[in-house]
Structure formats: structure tokens, C-alpha cells
Image (cartoon, rainbow, N blue to C red):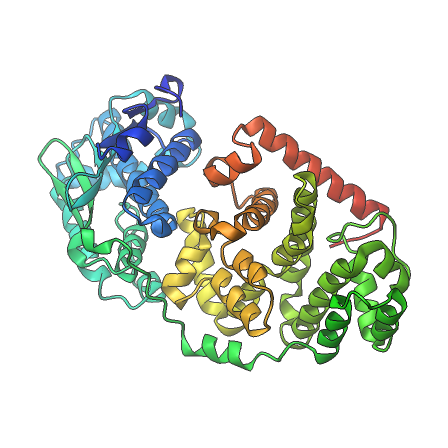
Amino acid sequence: MEGTQQTSHYFCKPVDYKEALTRGEDVYLQFSLLTPEVEACLIRVLSIYLSQLDLLYLKDMFINILKELVNNAIKANAKRLYFKRKNLDINKKEEYRNGMETFKEDVFVGNPEFLEELGKSNFIVRVFFSITGDIHKIHVINNVPIIPEEMNKINARIKKAYTYHGISDAFDDILDDSEGAGLGLIITLILMKNAGFPPEAFSMSTNGKITSATINIDESFRNMDLKVKMAQEIINEVESLPSFPQNILEIQRLCANPESTIKAIADSIKRDPGLVTAILKLANSAGYITSKRVETIEEAVKIIGTKGINTLLVASGVQKIIDSRYKKFETIWNNSYKTAFYAQWIAMKYRKERLSEFAYLASLLSDIGLMVLLSIKPDEIQKIREIVGLKQLDNISILEEISLGVSHSTLGSLICQKWKFNDALVKAIEFHHRPHLAPSQYRDLIYIVYLAYVFTSIESKNFRFEIADEDCLDYFKLNNKTNFDELHQLIKAKFEEYSQNNKITN
């Protein structure tokens, strides 16, 4: 963000927040509405702040927490403006009850005029980042006092949140989220609990003029690791997965031998008619880029090369396991081909040809952990998806971790470790939702896979440009939305053209 953004009714002080936080100075962001621009700025400031505390691995958690607290503060401000317009006294129980009966529908259901008025009002939210001393704090402040009835509800939620074992307990127990003190606040506190924060790390207070939600980050949380404890069923499922097909491993060894001839590789593949069909199908799929339609295994080896054949062998082996064990989740697998195409194309577009095969595979296999979770705990996953939709959260992985003990990305990487896949592939799958944690030696690959995921997620309306990882956008020189959209539309058109030319449907 450059300077004060008056058109969006928000500003950050000081303007050079990166330098300020580096020097250990306080920074705050002030606004009336959580617009995409405000959200993008909030995430950027948070990233720098957490980096200074060596807590960047908690970035996803804090994004969800801050958005929940900010939205609650905005709702509280909207409530005051609404009651003012209705000539109701919010401090009188009967008038409060009458106003709340219509507040949610009148304000948040198809009423852009009211939100525009709120954006221009004197009701503001300030997110304050303090980095002074050993106790670091984040305050979410709004300039209206919380009334006793609301504070009582919030305190009850705070007290109860640390008794829940997981999201399911909370989801079943929530009776009222109309005040913004229901499920969202519970999720916030469970996230903090599972990251190791004690109950006193979060508090709500008012001085009669403002209301503040405060997160205290003690020095002891530096270099802390999240304690991930997978459910036993998940561990058992991973352990019981079949080993990678032996015939494919043998052909892979043949491909790795520089003295192997095209005929020897093709003949070895042809001994397995099922493998022949699978490889030709994959080679001509909307995921794998070739210059012309591949009709024979010899052509596949010549056109695609041994590295490409090795990639298709891995994909074929995984598909064989999916067909035998997770057939009902085949749609997820098929949808991954588009992401794989995007990743391979991005690698070639940015002259990272040596990474194109890994990028293809990592994108193709990125959701294998999700299929496993769906097969073991379908009810839990369904509840998580309901919560994500209800609270409009951006990262399902966070809720997977606190409810199941592991995200589908981490689980996917564990499965690939079991199959003894290359470490670069394992890491790309593990961090494809969290590129800011990418190990430096695999950063290029992980950024490619992440960008492909962002593009396809935008198409399914599960993502927005404004929340894309800033470092990744900088890496590809796509931090300008126009450039980002142009590349997205170009790669989308390439995919559609390739699919049409090869008469492919995914």
C-alpha cells in the first residue's frame, strides 16, 4: 500500500510499516469496512509483524482470527448506526431486543446503501500491532462501547471455548451467532488453544468509549511448533495404503538408466496393457502438454521424453490406487488435471522447464490427502465445509488441522513420503497452500504450484486476488491485478484450446 488510501476510507500509520515494524515501532491500520484492499493491507502488515516475532508459520491462523475479530467490530459499529437510524436505545433491553429482530436482515441482506453509509460514518475499526518489549499485542478496536448483555455473552463463549475438544463439539453447541459472538469467536479461541496459547492470551474489554479485543503474544511463543496429533484412524489409513506398484517402479528404474533405449522402455510398458491405456490417456489428458496427440507408447517416449514418461508413470500408479480405494472421489482427482496443466504451463512460461514435470505432479497429487480425509471422516469434513461457508473463511486447512489434527496438504505429503517420492515433490504438496513457509531450496516449485492452485480456485470462486501471497505475486511480477488477470485469462484460454483440440473433458 502506498500512502493513505482515502478512496477506500482506510489508512496505515506509519506509511512505511515495514520499516517501522523492523525498528520495533507500533503500527496500526484504520478503516470502516473490510474491503478487499483493506484485507490485502491487513495481511501484508500481519506478515511483517509475525516475521519480526519469528511466528510466520502461524500466519494462516492469525489471518482467520483477525478477520473474525474485525468483522465482529464492524458488526458492532453497524449495530450502533442501525439503532441510531431507528431511534432505538441500544442500552434498553426491550428496544435492544426489538432492534436485533430486524438488524441482520436489514443491514447485511442486500442493503449496499447502509454499508456505504457505514463506510462514510465516524464509526471506525483500528487494528493495532504492538511490538514493544517481551509481551507483543494485537488489538482490534472499535470506537463504540460494548453493552453489558453483549459482554456477558462473549465472556461465556471465551470461558467455554477452552473446554471444547474440537470444532464438532463447538458446532453442535452453538445456539446463537447473530451477535458475532458465536461460532466465529469459538473458532478463534480453539485455533489459539491448539497453537498452545493459554486462555488468558485473549481478552475483551471496554472503557465506556471503545471496545478492544486483544491477543497477547508472550515471548515464550517464539520458535514454538504446532503440536499436530493425528487421529489414530488417519494414521491407520496411511499405514494401510498399498505400496507403489512394483511394475511401475521397475519401469522408472529403466527410465533413469541413460543407456536404456526408447524401444526397451516402450516394450517394458507394453507388458502391462492397463498401464499402456493409462499412460496414453494421461499423455492426452487436459493436464499434460504435448505438441500433438499421442497414439502409441513409442510416440509418448519420443515426444514426452523419459522424464515425462516417469511423471506419467507416477500419475498412473497413483490413479491405480485411487481406482481401487477411493473411486467415489474420482471427481477431485479429475479436477486436479486442470491445476496440473496450469502448473506445467506456468513453469514453461517463466522458463523453469526443469521444474515443469515436478510442478505437474505436485499439482495433480495436491488433493490426495483430501480424498483420504473424506474417506475416513466424511461427517467431520462436511462440518468443516459448512463452517468455512458460514464464516466465509479462506483457508480450509486451518480448520482441518484443529478438528482432525492434520491438514489435507500435510497428509498428502505424508502419503507421498510413504511412496518414497522425491523430496521436492513431497514439500511442494505440503506447502502448496502456505507458500510463505516454503523451504528456500523448493521455493520456485512451490510458488508455481501455489499460483496454479490460486488460478483454479478463483475459477471455482474459492479464492480472490486480494488474499494471494504477496511474496509469490512479487516473484512472478503479478502484484498488479491487471497483469495477474491477463496471465490468468491467457492460461485459461490455453487450457480450453488444448482440451477442445484433443476432445477432452475433465
Q: How many marks?
A: 0
Question: Which is more toward the observer, 432 or 444?
Answer: 444
Left-right relation of 394 to 185: right
Residue 421 versus residue 308 in the image, above or below: below
Residue 329 versus residue 142 in the image, above or below: below
Residue 53 versus residue 386 in the image, above or below: above
Question: x, y (%) of residue 458?
Answer: 57, 42
Question: Which is more toward the observer, 203 or 380?
Answer: 203
Residue depicted at 22% across the width and 66% down the height: 163
Residue depicted at 58% across the width and 78% down the height: 241
Question: Which is more toward the observer, 437 or 454?
Answer: 437
Spot the residue most to the front.
259
Q: Taking the image as drawn, is residue 20 in sight?
A: yes
Question: x, y (%) of residue 67?
Answer: 34, 42
* Residue 193: quarter of image: bottom left
Q: Taking the image as drawn, is residue 106 in sight?
A: no
Q: Quadrant of the N terminus?
A: top left
Q: Quadrant of the C terminus?
A: bottom right
Question: x, y (%) of residue 176?
Answer: 29, 53
Question: x, y (%) of residue 287?
Answer: 73, 53
Residue depicted at 54% across the width and 70% down the height: 417
Residue 233 versus residue 94 in the image, above or below: below
